[in-house]
Image (tube, rainbow, N blue to C red):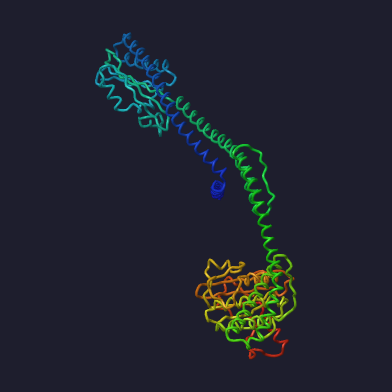
Amino acid sequence: MPKLRRSFSFTRLLRHGRSEVRRSLQARTVALTVILTLAVAIVLSMVSMVSVRVSLLTQITSQSRADYSNMIQQAQTSLDAADVSATVQIQQLANDLASTLQSDGASNLVGVYLWSRDTSSPRSIIPVSTEPSYEPLISDDMRSAVASDVNENVFYQPVDLTLESGMAGIPGMPGGGTPGAVLGTTLEFGVAGNLEFFAIYSYTLQQQSLTQIQLNLVAICVLLSIMVGVVMWLVIRGIVRPIERVASAAEVLASGELDTRVAVDRKDEIGVLQHSFNTMADSLNQKIDELEEASASQKRFVSDVSHELRTPVTTMRMASDLLEMKKDDFDPSAKRTVELLAGQINRFQDMLADLLEISRYDAGYAALDLVETDLREPVSTAADQVAGIAQAKQVPIHLYLPNVQVLTRIDSRRVIRIVRNLLANAVDFAEDRPVEVRIAANRKAVAISVRDYGVGIAEDKISHVFDRFWRGDPSRSRVTGGTGLGLSISMTDALLHHGIIRVRSELGEGTWFLVLLPRDPDQGEVADADLPVDFASAKPDDLRITGGFGVAESHVAGAQESRRDTVDSMMGRPL
């Protein structure tokens, strides 16, 4: 279990490190620098190790050869000066010679080995070795080379001195064990024939030195990488921190704090960035002030013009009404002109009314006149006001209203305007198909649905339907002659009630507007979870009057009080 925990911790740490490298320029730069530094250090260390190894091997090999040459001279001198004839004397001489050479040899001399070249001679000596355990390191090839040599050459073979289960390692180049070398030649000994002389040297000290150098190089590589990482971290930190301050200031500026500035405390490229940010902020602040002033001037202009035009339009309205009363006395051409004049003056008045309403919203003078009202009444009134237009365009309006009261605190005038604008918009684009109006409610909110099955709105244009002066199809011939302000005013009226208007549409399938209003605006907005309709998942075709609301008198059962109980018990259900 501890092993699993350590593995899990390491995995989580690795994942965190990757995440930090991905999101932080500073961490990514430091990590890359450390990796590159470590890679370069490792490559240089490997090159250095190869060079040091070759140098040490060359040095110790030269020393071993020199020591072996001295032993050859010493042994040959002893053999030449020896006065022996008996076999026992010859054997004793070989034993003493091997012991002397072992004791007088170099400190890394492992063993000395002597035996007769001609083993069939009656005076051949018994093989002598000062370290028998390493005798297997003298390979058959080495023995054959020495035995067949007639020029008294010195033969050299590197070996591995590692012993396993009492056996010497396989001869070859020094590997992972203890390196060493075997040297061999022939000594002249007339009495007993020539002797084969071998010596084994150990390179243990050199191997230890090489291992220590390797450890030192590894430590140097790690420390160098850490030092470079720390230095790079400090350097990058000095660059990143001022940029972070500029980025933080940019976020604050974007949130609306237009007075945000950064201190210019450097003279390098970072200082240029700081100065540029401050210059940009000053320019942006100036532009915003200019735009606000232009917007205020535009709003004042619209308000002033709208108010100033009311008097001449009223006069025109009075004159038009007078002509309207006497139009039957005129010839057909004049009569038609009077009708057109009356229609355009009506449209002009509607435009002025919309502009005045917009100007009141912008000035902050719009206020609600809340009265507890049966929601069916303003909806029916709005439908009656649009009935003439719908009849002219042969668009039926179907009202599916509850057969009991839906009492809500609303500003009836504004709710009538909301529904009227939505109905007028639906009639314009219904393409002779019906328009459906439904109502649903629960204890906290009410919903007014206006659904048409006309041309619909493209997906990329839905977000603009509530923009001022926006028209879905400017070239379209409209009976109502809209200004492009109706839906914008409707949305503002809904917002004044702490409500909202939501819309869904699809080309060729029609458009669905849903007005969502709290039953008591003084309580503030209603959360989506408490609305009577889940507009995001509901389907317009599934919209039905449920929740206890009937749509015909035949559905009403009992007295008014019993109907109210039925409504209250079912108000939590969606449309």
Q: Is residue 268 above or below residue 159?
A: below
| Closer to the camera in the image, 528 or 426 | 426
- Can you say whether 334 is above or below 11 in the image? below
Picture residue at 63% right of the left edge, 46% below the top: 277
Q: Where does the image place residue 65, in percent across and percent down from the top left?
A: 37, 18
Coordinates of residue 103 in the picture (x, y in percent): 42, 16
Horizontally, is 427 left or right of 413 in the view? left
Q: Nearer the viewer, residue 490 or 20?
A: 490
- Residue 552 visible from this viewpoint: yes
Vertical arrangement, residue 131 with respect to residue 26, above or below: above
Residue 225 image position (x, y, % from top left): 54, 35
Quadrant that contains the C terminus: bottom right
Closest to the observer: 15 or 402?
402
Q: Is residue 545 visible?
A: no
Q: Is residue 179 left or right of residue 304?
A: left
The quadrant in which residue 82 appears is top left
- Residue at the image point whose x is 69% and y is 64% from the top: 301
Q: How many marks?
A: 0
Q: Answer with the quarter of the image where residue 489 lies.
A: bottom right
- Tell me: 109 left or right of 398: left
Residue 420: x and y in percent read 64, 78
